[in-house]
Image (tube, coloured by chain):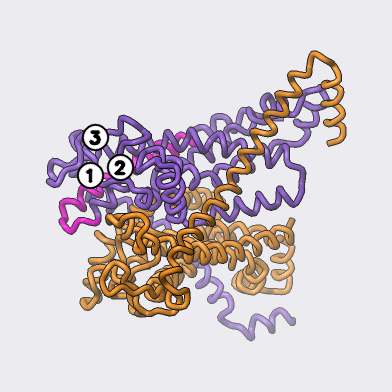
Chain colours: A orange, B purple
Amino acid sequence: MPQIAATEVLIASRGRCNLRTVFEGILHAVLLACAVVSIITTVGIVLVLLLESLQFFRDVSVWEFLTGTKWSPLLKPQHFGILPLFCGTFLVAAGSSVIAIPIGLGTAIFLSEYAPPVVRDIVKPLLEVLAGIPSVVFGYLAVVFVSPIIKELFPSAEVFNAASACIVVGFMILPTIVSLSEDVLRSVPRSLREAAYALGATKLDVTVGVVVPAAMSGIMASFLLAIARAVGETMAVTLAAGATPKLTLSFFESIQTMTAYIVQVSQGDTPAGTLEYRTIFAVGLTLFIFTLSLNVVAQWILNRVREKYE
Amino acid sequence: MKLHAHSKSRPYAKFASTCFAVMCGFCTVLSVLVLLVVLWNIFSYGWSALSWNFVTSWPSRFPAKSGIWSALIGSLYLIGVTAVVSVPVGVGAAIYLEEYAPPSRWRTLVQVNIANLAGVPSIVYGILGLGLFVRMMHLNRSVIAGGLTLSLVVLPIIILSAQESLRAVPSTIRQASYALGATRWQTIWHQLLPVALPGILTGVILSLSRALGEAAPLVVVGAATFVAFTPENLMTDEFSALPIQIFNWTEQPQKDFHQLAAAGIIVLLVVLISMNALAIILRQRFGKKVKW
């Protein structure tokens, strides 16, 4: 870089090029401003969520919010316990992980360890297409396609149920797991595999005993990112899982997630400035903290993995 | 001898290995199959409801008369606003981070911040848009408010992909340019950007197709579901969007509306696929030209 600085000084010293130096300086400032937009976005999110939430917590104690077992801000008598929404979000995240983690890891292992390059070149773009399908489309599928099947198999299931949401969200987050895990599995050095083969290991031993453990932290990060996506997933869950916040562990009942509640309030005509209106900021803040922590941990793990193999 | 004894003590080792391979292959088939089931389901259900009339009609309470025109136009406006805002800012930020900012705490901070923003659920951006654009800046429930919100959603993705494309340009190109006396901006404008362009464009189009499918932030910002006009004034008029309209139709209990939703999804997918096809063509057309 010092050479470049020297060039700039050289150019600047010639009088006729002063304009250019000014131009370069302005561009530098403009580009810096572009980067600062991302910082402002974060600050904006935190400020908007915090300011309205603080107003909310003047009327409702934090303790009541975090430990209350009943959520009904839109009906009298009002209750502001977030646990039922939390429970709904947990059910969807857990259920979709149960589907996405085994299938995703299996696919990642197949693509990185078994599949010939031709198959990989076909499957990976197809999974990208799956990843590109909008969330509302999955919501439509849950309502029109998955839910009737579930009702057929389990007649006691309600029309809107957590299971149909879990299934579609599971397939939504699948590509996240596959693409990240596959990257990490492929970055495991060849020498590790060859050493294991040399000791007489079968392909199964090598994959399960050597490659997967070596890539474990990266695989875990992909799980965390996928779970964070499931937690933040909105439209599919709103359409499929219903609008009944309740504390239950049954996958066949109508529930409500944090995201679905925000949509429900947004669709109604709740006037700004009321307590009901502020609930979405309090719920949004909870959701933000939750997904942010998952993402931070995942990013931290991924950075460590990158350092390890680069 | 030892090896032989080893394999003898595990008579099913080979069989287990094969089983595992088959299981993993099965997972792969399943994930691809899901995509086919999704597409087949939508097309078989929505195809009959799809017509030119459907594309050019306003939404209505009567399924037979209902169409998707206002949503389609609303989506195109939104994408326009999003592109105008997010592409220059995103590419600018990427250029700053890759070419200007020296490795420092500040750069790490911005970088970590962007990675985390990429993971923030889109509905949280909706809340930001509601608080910032709709209430504080009094943009109301307008196309501009929706477009600005979507810009913030896709900004981190554009920045990250543009950074990757810039990073892929060999540093020898930069050094050669500086050696010839070019300034930093001349190097960026004449050497780096033309080479990195296909990669940047691919990232941009993928991000914009993500924005096209986003419904959650728009619901929070206040997109309307029954809009029987196309927005004339971007700053004040209400708007609808394709995913919002699909969401609304899916919410209705009547089966006829579900069929409309499927037809709407086909329209949405056609727009998405054309955008992605464009990305692929650009990547292949321009990707091969550059050789050092």
Callout 2 crowding tier (Cα within 10 Å): few <14, some 14–19, many ≥20: many
Q: Earlier in the sequence, mark 3 or mark 2?
A: 3
| Residue holding disc 2 | B240
Is B205 located above or below residue A86 in the figure? above
- Residue at 43% in and 65% down: A56
Q: Quadrant of residue B195?
A: top right
Residue A230 in sight here = no
What kind of secondary structure does the magenta stretch mostly adopt? helix
Q: Quadrant of residue A55?
A: bottom left
- Residue at 85% in and 26% down: A9
Per the image, label 1 sits on a secondary structure element best described as: loop
Dot 3 amino acid type? Phe
Q: Nearest the camera: B55 or B123?
A: B123
- State if disc 2 and disc 1 touch (CB < 8 Å): yes
In space, the residues marked 1 and 2 are separated at their CA atoms by 7 Å
Q: Is residue A171 magenta?
A: no
Q: Earlier in the sequence, mark 1 or mark 2?
A: 1
In space, the residues marked 3 and 1 are separated at their CA atoms by 9 Å
Count every numbered label the image shows and give the total: 3
| Residue holding disc 1 | B226
In space, the residues marked 3 and 2 are separated at their CA atoms by 9 Å
- State if disc 2 and disc 3 touch (CB < 8 Å): no
Q: Which residues are magenta?
A: B251-279
What chain does badge 2 belong to?
A: B
Callout 3 crowding tier (Cα within 10 Å): few <14, some 14–19, many ≥20: some
Per the image, label 2 sits on a secondary structure element best described as: loop
Asked if both marks, 3 and 2, belong to the same chain, the answer given is yes
Q: Position of residue A19 (x, y in %)?
A: 74, 18
Q: Quadrant of the N terminus of chain A?
A: top right
Q: Position of residue B113 (x, y in %)?
A: 62, 53
Q: Position of residue A127 (x, y in %)?
A: 46, 53
